[in-house]
Amino acid sequence: MKRLLLFIFGVTLSLNAFAWGQKGHDIVAYIAECHLTPAAAEKVGAVLGGRSLVYYANWMDNASNTPEYAYSKTWHYMNIDEGETLETQPRHPKGDLLTAIESITKDIEKGRWSEKEHLDGLRMLIHLVGDLHCPMHAGRSTDRGGNGVPVLFFNRETNLHSIWDSALLESAHSWSYTEWQWNLDRVAEEFATQVQQGTPEEWFEQTVRIAKRIYEVTPEGTKVSYDYVNAMAPVIEQQLLFGGLRLAGLLNELYK
């Protein structure tokens, strides 16, 4: 664990010298799928009706914009404002990312859901663990997770949240989600096991630290170009890999 923490700290420091878009969620889901135990893969597949994790990786983004699932709109993020911590930041009254993950995992453990409720919960969990590792989903409420921070991305007007959702990822590597997995998912089993240790709350605290550093190095009006993409690529890669490994660990435990 000490080596893991040093690795995270080192990557965060490199920001001096990262909600995923569809591609990011596909990557997290596919890495997780590659690390499911046979027992978990069989049970998860049964709940998903034979579909893959990737098939439902982005389902929640669409569902949250429908009347049936509108209650989950605030579940994709948990804002941590400047000067606040996970402990001091007031929780959103309609729910937040961390609360949703904790609630869904407990309900799956109890096994009291109907078939439809179980399917919905699992589809949401696949997506939310990806969101948990996206830095701007731990951004400030004062600027709506970076949406209110204007930047220039290769001279195109956009905002901080948008570039961290997908633009940086696509600029770092023009790979399919399977190619992302093939290139990132090469760590030793011991390291993967270390990454999976801890709780969603501890994982989110790591994301919060990364988000704070991003704000420091990306003030309003920042001109994002090749040097920024190169500096942030290792952070993007780490968060996608960690998200996938941890989703697998969570599902392996829930469906053992």
Image: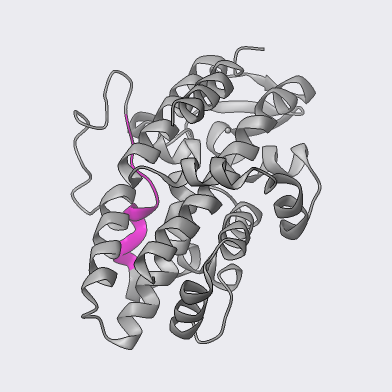
- Which segment did they paint magenta? 70-80
The furthest residue to the front? 190
Q: Looking at the picture, does residue 216 appear above or below residue 131?
A: above
Is residue 74 magenta-colored? yes
Rendering quarter of residue 81: top left
Q: Please indicate whether residue 129 sits to the left or right of residue 141 in the image.
A: right
Q: Please indicate whether residue 221 sits to the left or right of residue 194 in the image.
A: right
Q: Where is residue 35 drawn, in percent x and y?
A: 57, 61
The residue nearer to you, when weighing 225 against 25, is 25
Q: Where is residue 205 drawn, in percent x and y?
A: 36, 33
Q: Looking at the picture, does residue 132 appear above or below residue 87?
A: below
Q: Looking at the picture, does residue 94 appear above or below residue 43?
A: above
Rendering quarter of residue 225: top right
Q: Please indicate whether residue 124 sits to the left or right of residue 188 in the image.
A: left
Q: Where is residue 228 drawn, in percent x and y?
A: 70, 22
Q: Where is residue 52 drawn, in percent x and y?
A: 59, 75
Q: Say if residue 112 shows up in the picture.
A: yes
The furthest residue to the top? 17
Q: Residue sitting at 56 percent across and 32 percent down?
A: 160
Is residue 122 magenta-colored? no
Q: Say if residue 64 shows up in the picture.
A: no
Q: Please indicate whether residue 19 sits to the left or right of residue 238 in the image.
A: left
Pick the quarter of the image with the N terminus. Answer: top left
The residue nearer to you, when weighing 190 against 8, is 190
Pick the quarter of the image with the C terminus. Answer: bottom left
Q: Residue sitting at 50 percent across and 87 percent down?
A: 49
Rendering quarter of residue 139: top left
Colour convention: one colour
Q: Residue sitting at 35 percent across and 42 percent down?
A: 198
